[in-house]
Amino acid sequence: MSMDATTTSTASGTPMPTEWRDFFTLTKPRVMTLVIFTAICGVLAAPGSIHPVLGFTAILAISMGAGGSAVLNMWWEADIDAGMKRTMNRPLPGGRMRREDARDFGIFLSAVSVALMGVAIGWLAAGLLALAIVYYAVIYTMWLKPRTPQNIVIGGGAGAFPPMIGWIAVTGEVTAMPILLFAIIFFWTPPHFWALALFVQSDYAKVGIPMLPVVAGEKPTRRQIWWYTLVLAPIAIAPWAIGGTSWIYGMTAVTLSALFILLAWPVGQRMRSEDDKMLPEKKLFKFSIYYLFALFAALVLDRVAAYQGWIA
Amino acid sequence: MTPEEQAEFERRRKARNYVVAGTLLFFVVLFYAITIVRMGD
């Protein structure tokens, strides 16, 4: 770990207080925006009502839990981050913070998020939040990420919790709909991430993380993008098919999923040529982001329209 | 500690203290609001 004397300690050896911004950076604020968005969608789309203060608290607790587990992820992977260009300037590999401080901050944030959810909302949602944190920080980060090329699939599970917890914070019970919301993000993550992995040169191989395109090669990665997209489509349409939503969500899901399949087809079939600009892969990656946002936005719109009585 | 280091030390500590104070205040207000809402249930 590189240590910069001007950022961690004075010339006389007195430790410098860590900048508060570095603590904030540890929570991965950019990832958090997607967590907050999908959690809000879960809260808004769930049947029944929740007081705005409690709805806000639920979203805050989910965000804090996501932040806490991100901090624990950065604490555990400090050495890996130090070996990759994209991550070497993070607070820990950059030497701007002590490792123990990051660990303690992550545990504190995670514990407070679960306690807040339990006290303010309910212990079912709090239990799921605790499970999501353990899933990301322990099962994914510490255990499976360095061991299997399917790590992205497993990591996708962590990102899939927020809308489910948001939904359950309102209803207080586990039903088919929140499980489907979980499944949508779960099956969306592999084609989304692997499309990116095909056109971005990463140095995961250098630090011993077995990413699929590196370990299995280009062809199997492309094939898996295709198959995950095919599985995703019926799952995305399922909320409508089981009668959980109206045609607003149904038509949006059918259209978006058809487009997703159309864009994934060339990615699944072709192989990289010399001087390849990787346009189909870039297109698919960009579209996958719009896809998730549009799908969840349609779900909220659909449910709000139904509760307001605008549609049957 | 040089005067520059001392100044930087104090700036960082002050900024952190403000953030902690603001966070605590936020949670005091939030818990008050949660209590009022839950009592009304």
Image (cartoon, rainbow, N blue to C red):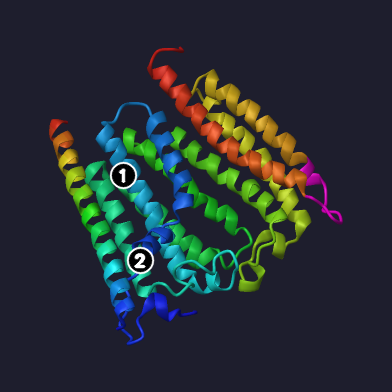
| Residue A284 or residue A45, whichever sits in front | A284
| Count of picture labels | 2
Residue A259 falls in image quadrant: top right
Farthest residue in the front direction?
B3
The residue wearing badge 1 is: A124
Category of crowding for the residue at label 1, using alpha-carbon neighbours closer than 10 angstroms: few (below 14), some (14–19), many (at least 20): some
| Residue A68 or residue A101, whichever sits in front | A101
Vertical side of A21 occupied by A235: above or below: above
Q: Please give the chain letter of the residue carrying mark 1.
A: A
Q: Decide if residue A260 is in sight here.
A: yes
Q: Position of residue A84 (x, y in %)?
A: 59, 69
Residue A203 falls in image quadrant: bottom right
| Residue B23 or residue A273, whichever sits in front | B23
Secondary structure character of the magenta stretch overall: loop
Residue found at x 34% / y 69%: A18
Category of crowding for the residue at label 2, using alpha-carbon neighbours closer than 10 angstroms: few (below 14), some (14–19), many (at least 20): some
Q: Which mark is residue A19?
A: 2
Sequence order check: which comes first, mark 2 or mark 1?
2
Q: Decide if residue A172 is in sight here.
A: no
Task: Name the amino acid, label 1.
Answer: Leu
Give the magenta part as a residue range. Answer: A266-277
Q: Position of residue A148 (x, y in %)?
A: 61, 64
Left or right for A256, reference A100: right
Farthest residue in the right direction?
A274
> What element does badge 1 sit on?
helix
Residue found at x 38% / y 60%: A21
| Residue A168 or residue A275, whichever sits in front | A275
- State the CA–CA distance, disc 2 to disc 1: 36 Å
